[in-house]
Every structure is written in structure tokens, then in C-alpha cells.
Amino acid sequence: MSALQRRTPKAEARAESQRERILDAAQKCFIEQGFQGAGMALIAETAGISTGLTYRYFDSKSAIMLAIIARELEGKRARIEELCGGDDFLAAVLEKFRAWQAGSADVMNAALFLEMSAEASRSPEILEAIRKSDALVLGEFEGWLRRDRSAGGLGMPAGDASRRALLMQCLIEGLVVRAARDPDLDADAVGRALAPVFEQLGFTTPGTTRP
């Protein structure tokens, strides 16, 4: 029996807590220093542990980034439920935009999103992980668009749902980048610009209150 198999539930919980501590520290370092500028020693220092212990959990920064991408995927799924679960989709998107501007811990950090995108251009492994994550998110969003209105969806035909899901994914990712580049941009102005687009695409009902 291996050491891993002999782990008690308490030890498993402690290991998971340590792992999350490292991921939180790495995420902070990647945001503040960039992926290339944040070494394993800095991540360990930020986590308050030794560099050697950090390597026991992750053998490289790329492994840490892959774990962060996987963790962010779960967060994205939860946020899609939030976006699609209310009565005013545009208002929900603008709420997320404000959170991106503020660097809120409740949403994907805009600076981290840019770091992930940049590293994907250098690492095929990270690129593949992001592609898989994006595909799953796209499927979740498309599923909402296709779901019957009586079940909380928009009841779109499959072809329309597929095209509009991709368009919305591009639009939302663009808003993340815009929030990073212009944290002082008036969110209400963004809402006024998006309102007619959302109506035309069928994401909001004509006459929905605009910012």
C-alpha cells in the first residue's frame, strides 16, 4: 500500500488545504508579477511555506497554472448559472464587468485572464487546457440558450444557439480585457452600448430597463 493510499481523511484535508494555499499564493504572484516574473521561491514565500514543500505539490509553475485553470473552470460554471439564472441578463453581465474592474475575488481576475492567455501562446500544454476549459464553458452557455423557456432557457434552435454562444463568449472575454485595460470605464455607458446588441441577439427582452 502506498503512502498516498494510507493517508487519513484528516491528512487528505490538510494536504488539500496546503494545495489551495499554494494556488492562492501563485495566483496573487501571477497577477502582481506576471507568470514569467513569479518564480517558485516567490510563490512559496507568499504562501508562507518552503520552496521544497511547494515542489512536493507541484513540480513546476506550469503545473500550478494548469491547476488554476481547472479551478477557474468550476468558478466559470457557477458564474454562468448566475448570469443565466436571473431575469435581466444584461444587468448580470454589467455586474460582472464592474467586478472585473474592481478585481473582485468573486470573478475571474482580468489580469490573471491576460496572463493565462499570454502563457497559452508559449505553452502547448496550457493552450490545450484553456481550449478544453473554453469548450466546456461554451457548451454550458449553449445549453442555456437551447433550454426551453419554461425551464429557464431561451428556447433557441441548435444552430442559432451554437452561433450566439460563441459570439457571447467572445463578447464577454472582450469585456474582461476591456476591464483590465480601462478600470475607470463607465459601466453604465458599456450597458447602453450593449443593450441594443443584446436585444437583437435575443439575450434580453425589448424594453428591458437600460442603464
Image: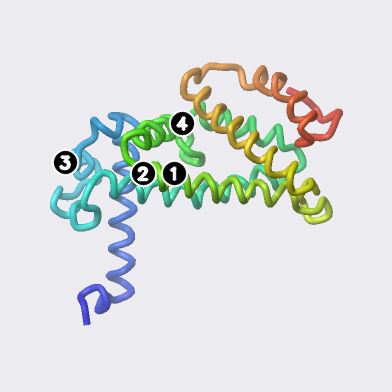
Of the residues under marks 3 and 1, which one precedes in the sequence? Answer: 3
Q: Which of marks 1 and 4 is nearer the N terminus?
A: 4
Can you give x and y, in whole percent of width and height, for residue 28 in the image? 33, 37
Q: Nearer the viewer, residue 160 or 90?
A: 160
Residue identifier under label 3: 41
* Amino acid on which the number 2 mark rests in the picture: Ile
Q: Which residue is the site of mark 4?
A: 110
Determine the CA span between mark 1 and mark 4.
15 Å
Asked whether the residues under the numbered discs 1 and 4 touch, taking CB atoms below 8 Å apart as contact, a structural biologist would say no
User: In the picture, which quadrant includes the C terminus?
Assistant: top right
Q: Is mark 4 on a helix, strand or loop?
A: helix
Q: Do the residues labelled 4 and 2 touch (CB within 8 Å)?
A: no
Left-right relation of 46 to 167: left
Q: Along the polypeptide, which appears first: circle 4 or circle 2?
A: 4
Which quarter of the figure has residue 16?
bottom left
> Could you tell me residue 89's position as x and y percent?
72, 37
Where residue 178 appears, as percent x and y from the top left, is 52, 22
Label 4–label 3 contact, CB within 8 A? no
Find numbered disc 1 in the image and state the secondary structure of the residue it sits on.
Answer: helix
Residue at the right extreme of this rendering = 207
- In the rendered view, does 156 fall on the left or right side of 124? right
Badge 4: residue crowd in 10 Å (few <14, some 14–19, many ≥20)? many
Q: In the structure shown, which secondary structural element does the residue marked by tag 3 occupy?
A: helix
Q: Which residue is drawn at 15% across and 49% down?
A: 50
What crowding class fits label 3: few (fewer than 14 Cα within 10 Å), some (14-19), or many (20 or more)? some
Q: How many labels does the image show?
A: 4
- The residue indicated by pointer 2 is 126
**Separation of marks 1 and 2 at Cα, in angstroms:** 6 Å
Label 2 secondary element: helix
Q: Say which amino acid is labelled 4.
A: Ala
